[in-house]
Image (spheres, rainbow, N blue to C red):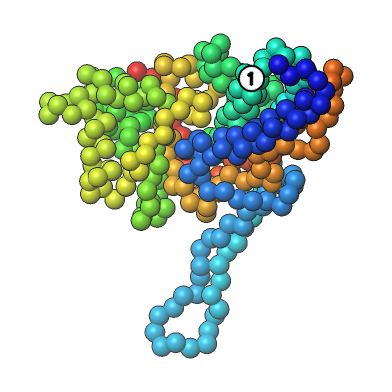
Amino acid sequence: MVTTATNVQVFDKELYQALAERASAYARENALVNKIPVALAPFNMEQYKKPVFGETDNIRGGRPSVGDKVTTRKDTKVFELADVYMTLYWDQYDIMKEGKFLEQMKTEQLQEWARQANMSLLKGVFDEGYSNPAVDATGSAGQGNKLINGILDDADTVADLDGTDSALTAAGDVYAALVKMVTSIPFRYVQGKEIILGMTPHFYEMANSATFTNTAGKTEWEMFMDKHVSGPSPYKVSSEIMFSDDLFKVAGDVTNTNDRLFAVIAEPNIIERAYSRGFGKMGPDIPNSVGGIEQTWTVKEAGCVIRPEAVLLSEVITW
């Protein structure tokens, strides 16, 4: 058992190195988040400015000659950045109490920080973080004041998924809902690209239930996938479907009761995740009053929707 101050310092160094490796790994683990292109803002800035290019004019036909020069309209979108941080600490008592399991405990704390940082890109940064899904029926709801919006806040909403409402209760409703989600993205964004679909896991279970199985023996989900993943549909969908309650539920949604669908073209002219400070420790270790140390781990980020018409979230789905 480690008991001396000297060994505490040695342990601190080894633990920090282990945590630093895990911090960079956790930042890359969320499959959906990692499909969103990265933009790097200048270090520790409060805003990320994205140039947005519009239509190009003065392209002409006929014999080439000097004339009106080609022009492209340009705008700029400004996104506020905010930190998602935690204070990590340990001391001699923690080392004696937890022993070899201290690294495991701190690693799990670090993983929760990275999970909340990824949620913050989609659902916004809250000054009190997110609730514990184990004790919150709505599952990881934002707490306190919202500091900046997330991607879901700025996405366009798709309503009336079955053509009338989003209560999917009859045969044909699931297929209609999935088709409406992907075809609601203007085709000029879709052409030559794959649509990434995301959803709450309960949607998949319901979409493959007996209610939505046709006489051919396939569910409406399977029919949709056959046509839009491997079939001839011009609205080509990625085979990598992203399932998450953390990312796609919004305030008031109840786990395994309310569902959401999400659809996006993951291109940097459409959607980005901006960072002005990456996942890692900020500043020096600070000695605490009982012979240990405190560390601040932070990431400064924002989820940026540049073309909301190609970033879609369904209204709440009921069954």
Query: Which residue appears at 52% of the width and 87% of the height?
Result: 66
Q: Nearer the viewer, residue 25 or 316?
A: 25
Query: Which residue appears at 42% of the width and 53% of the height?
Result: 189
Query: Which residue appears at 80% of the width and 32% of the height?
Result: 285
Query: Which residue appears at 24% of the width and 30% of the height?
Result: 220
Q: Position of residue 47 (x, y in %)?
A: 71, 46
The mark tally for this picture is 1
Q: Residue at label 1?
A: 100
Q: Position of residue 58 (x, y in %)?
A: 50, 74
Residue 310 visible somewhere in the drawing: no
Q: Around disc 1, counting alpha carbons within 10 Å, would you say few (fewer than 14), some (14 to 19), or many (20 or more)? A: few
As shown in the figure, which amino acid type bears the numbered disc 1?
Lys
Q: Quadrant of the C terminus?
A: top left
Taking 281 as reference, is 40 left or right? left
Q: Is residue 4 above or below residue 25?
A: above
Q: Position of residue 198 (x, y in %)?
A: 42, 34
